[in-house]
């Protein structure tokens, strides 16, 4: 995880309104920040996909 604001970049994504609302509600219920969840999802995706590329 980044340690300071200078280690962070802004990533923009377009998602349907209904998905955004569901995500926002789910993150509130889980007591997690949406940014934290997105970071976790990106890291998981990278781990899965980088391993597939290394296996090829």
Image (cartoon, rainbow, N blue to C red):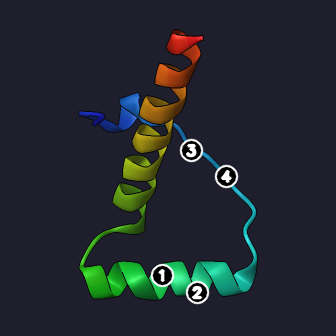
The residue wearing badge 2 is 21
Q: Secondary structure at mark 1?
A: helix
Q: Residues within 10 Å of mark 1 (few under 14, many from 20)?
A: some
Q: Position of residue 24 (x, y in %)?
A: 48, 81
N-term-proximal mark, 2 vs 4: 4
The quadrant holding residue 33 is: bottom left
Rendered residue at 46%/22% (across/down): 51
**Labels 1 & 4 near each other (Cβ < 8 A):** no
Q: Nearer the viewer, mark 2 or mark 4?
A: 2
Q: Nearer the viewer, residue 9 or 20?
A: 20
The circle on residue 50 is none
Q: Nearer the viewer, residue 26 or 49?
A: 49
Q: Residues within 10 Å of mark 4 (few under 14, many from 20)?
A: few
Q: Position of residue 50 (x, y in %)?
A: 51, 22
What separation in Å lies between label 4 and label 3 (alpha carbons)?
7 Å
Q: Nearer the viewer, mark 2 or mark 3?
A: 2
Rendered residue at 58%/86% (across/down): 21
**Labels 4 & 3 near each other (Cβ < 8 A):** yes
What separation in Å lies between label 1 and label 4 (alpha carbons)?
16 Å
Q: Is residue 45 left or right of residue 16?
A: left
The residue wearing badge 4 is 12
Q: Secondary structure at mark 3?
A: loop
N-term-proximal mark, 2 vs 3: 3
In the image, residue 29 above or below residue 37: below
Q: Is residue 39 left or right of residue 12?
A: left
The residue wearing badge 3 is 10
N-term-proximal mark, 1 vs 4: 4
Number of marks in the image?
Answer: 4
The circle on residue 24 is 1
Q: Nearer the viewer, residue 8 or 14?
A: 14
**Labels 1 & 2 near each other (Cβ < 8 A):** yes
């Amino acid at each position: 995880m980044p340690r300071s604001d200078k280690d962070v970049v802004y990533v923009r994504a377009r998602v349907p309104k209904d998905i955004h609302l569901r995500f926002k509600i789910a993150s509130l219920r889980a007591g997690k920040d949406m940014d934290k969840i997105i970071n976790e999802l990106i890291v998981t995706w990278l781990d899965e996909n980088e391993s597939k590329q290394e296996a090829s």
